[in-house]
Amino acid sequence: MRASDKVYDTLRTEIVEWQLVPGTVLAEVEQSERLGVSRTPVREALARLVADGLAVAQRGRGVVVSEVGKDHLEDLFVLRRVLECENARLAADSAHAGEFAELAQAFDRAAAQESMPDAASGYYQLVARLDESIDQAAGNSYLSAALRNLRVHLQRVRRLAQDNPQRLRASAREHASIAWAIAQKNPDLAAAATTVHLHQSLTHIKNYTPTTERQHP
């Protein structure tokens, strides 16, 4: 892996996980010293982060981590609804639809767990598996590429909301419904289940009040 790719992956992870909070200045010298590389791969990585929308170039400050908040939610979820509903439709109409029963069962088990906050990391990995499986079953490379870029921003947005145990269980049930609909080769039901999940997710995040919840590092 090239040095610029390693720097990019490191910084992107730190931004998504709020280790680098919005407004943080990503100075080339500081980052090159911290990551043990020259300034050239850092400069290349920063350019990619700006292109992704995870950072912005500001006059007098250089490159800083971009802002993310409730004012971005509506736009993100409008695009998410269009892309994910169509992706679910295509997956349900594919020859791979039957493979989703196992994922649906995994989400059913997750919804029954009593310690969802403790298992949040594993749960999000399960969600990532479902996303990847839907992308592969849908078989539309352009749609998959658009969703990959969008999901990076959605991971940041998700950090705005606390891992509330009730919401995590409800989310698991919603994902199970999506997976079962695809397994049953029902495109309309898959799209409808996706719409319900996105509505509930957006409502939960919008109702989140940062001043009363956990603080970001």
Image (cartoon, grey):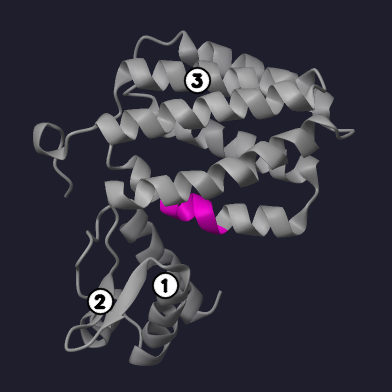
Q: Which residue is mark 1?
A: 49
Q: Which residue is mark 2?
A: 26
| Mark 2 surroundings: few (<14), some (14-19) or many (≥20) residues within 10 A | many
Q: Can residue 4 be seen here?
A: yes
- Using the numbered discs, state the Cα–Cα distance from disc 3 to disc 1 in whole angstroms: 31 Å
Question: Foreground: 74 or 21?
Answer: 74
Residue 38 placement (x, y as % from top left): 35, 89
Q: Secondary structure at mark 1?
A: helix
Residue 187 placement (x, y as % from top left): 78, 27
| Mark 1 surroundings: few (<14), some (14-19) or many (≥20) residues within 10 A | many
Amino acid on which disc 1 is placed: Leu
Magenta extent: 149-153
Amino acid on which disc 2 is placed: Leu
Q: Quadrant of the N terminus?
A: bottom right
The residue at 54%/33% (across/down) is: 127
Q: Single out the residue that lies furthest toward the right.
A: 95
Up-down: is 170 above or below 22? above
Residue 132 placement (x, y as % from top left): 65, 43
Is 11 one of the magenta-colored residues?
A: no
Q: How many marks?
A: 3
In terms of image quadrants, where is residue 40?
A: bottom left
Q: Which residue is mark 3?
A: 172
Amino acid on which disc 3 is placed: Ala
